[in-house]
Image (cartoon, coloured by chain):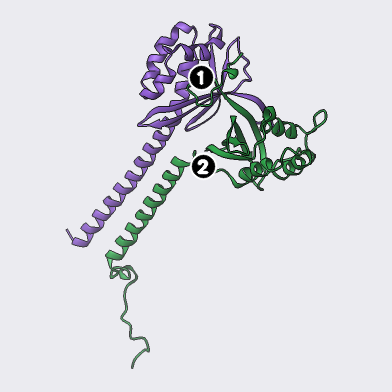
């Protein structure tokens, strides 16, 4: 009389011996291939990480700045949108104007220049170099360097250093005798 | 030896070889990246870190080895204009370099020299061609502003 289970009895220690060893090998090889690819991609990413696409928040910030047309009220609207305020939630006020307002106004509208556009001439991790242009598309020298640190939790510039880049040797194409360090 | 066992052994050793290759490849790439970044810092130190201006000849001999011909043409201290514009500000006094920020292609530094403000930021920009510095640009940062957190 049948017990109802016709499957042959296989001892537990022999249960997996019938499995095709080829499958194990293929699985192992796939695993190694995946590790290889991940390593390759990670290495390549690390290699090019210094040269980066400028963050959107930084590009938007300067795009809006040059469209303010030097209007005081416009700057006051743009800066709080992109710059991290002080811990008390307010901009840091100098004698008459916020320090940030003075920084960007004096840097971009330098010596009567009126930038209407800009070109990114260098973009590295936490650094961007900008060549501003006037309404005729002419370069407004000197260029501007902007070191930035973005906030971790929101698209805002947490900290920055801003300055104009004056070449001091004649081999720089934008060199001007007026910029010889005194 | 059983064929399947041999296949397994070949696959195992093959896998180990691939993993070892990945590790070596990653390590070499990391070294290469570090070297590209360090070459800019090295160049800045060779040019602007000296006890006496007389040291510059020896230091420029070392610099020559890490820059290509085009870069050498503009950096060489044989060029009087370059020397005047670059070294006059040191007032013949010793100088050392304080690296403030550096990336591959950019070194921002200040100079420790009695004749110069340690707050002034100087920039050395370059490209790497065949492992050597090329297309050099040098700037002085002026009208520097820092954010409320202190900036760089």
Q: What chain does badge 1 belong to?
A: A
- Is residue B29 depicted above or below A19 in this figure? above
From the top left corner, tell me how far across and down residue B76 is, in percent: 42, 16
Q: Nearer the viewer, mark 2 or mark 1?
A: 1
- Is residue A132 depicted above or below B72 in this figure? below
Chain identifier, purple in the render? B
From the top left corner, tell me how far across and down residue B19 is, in percent: 34, 47
Question: Is residue B80 visible to us here?
Answer: yes
* Shade representing chain A: green
- Is residue A74 depicted above or below B39 in this figure? below
Residue with the most extreme left position: B1
Residue B93 numbered tag: none
Mark 2, residue position: A52
Looking at the image, which residue is at 45% across and 6% down?
B54
Q: Residues within 10 Å of mark 1 (few under 14, many from 20)?
A: many
Task: Quote the CA–CA distance across marks 2 and 1.
Answer: 28 Å
Residue A169 numbered tag: 1
> A174 left or right of B148?
left
């Amino acid at each position: 009389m049948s017990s109802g289970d016709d499957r042959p009895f296989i001892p537990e220690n022999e249960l997996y011996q019938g499995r095709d060893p080829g499958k194990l090998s293929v699985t192992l090889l796939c695993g190694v291939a995946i590790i290889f690819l991940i390593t390759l991609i990670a290495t390549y990413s690390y290699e090019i990480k210094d040269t980066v696409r400028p963050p959107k928040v930084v590009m938007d910030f300067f795009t809006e700045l040059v469209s303010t047309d030097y209007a005081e009220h416009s700057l006051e609207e743009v800066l709080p949108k992109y710059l991290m305020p002080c811990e008390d939630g307010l901009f840091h006020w100098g004698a008459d104007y916020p320090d940030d307002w003075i920084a960007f106004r004096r840097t971009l509208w330098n010596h009567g220049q009126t930038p209407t556009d800009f070109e990114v001439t260098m973009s590295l991790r936490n650094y961007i170099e900008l060549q501003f242009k006037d309404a005729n598309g002419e370069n407004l020298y000197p260029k501007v360097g902007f070191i930035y640190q973005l906030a971790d939790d929101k698209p805002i510039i947490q900290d920055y250093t801003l300055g104009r880049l004056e070449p001091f040797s004649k081999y720089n194409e934008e060199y001007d005798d007026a910029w010889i360090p005194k | 030896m059983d064929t399947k066992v041999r296949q397994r052994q070949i696959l195992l050793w093959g896998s180990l070889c691939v993993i070892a290759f990945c590790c070596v490849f990653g390590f070499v790439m990391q070294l290469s990246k570090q070297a590209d970044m360090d070459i800019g810092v090295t160049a800045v130190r060779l040019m602007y870190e000296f006890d006496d201006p007389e040291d510059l000849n020896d230091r420029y001999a070392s610099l020559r080895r890490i820059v290509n011909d085009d870069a050498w043409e503009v950096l060489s201290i044989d060029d009087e204009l370059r020397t005047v514009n670059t070294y006059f500000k040191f007032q013949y006094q010793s100088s050392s370099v304080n690296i403030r920020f550096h990336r591959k292609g950019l070194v921002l530094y200040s100079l420790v020299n009695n004749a110069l403000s340690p707050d002034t930021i100087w920039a050395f920009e370059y490209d790497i061609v065949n492992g050597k510095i090329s297309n050099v640009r040098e700037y002085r940062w002026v009208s520097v502003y820092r954010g409320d957190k202190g900036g760089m």
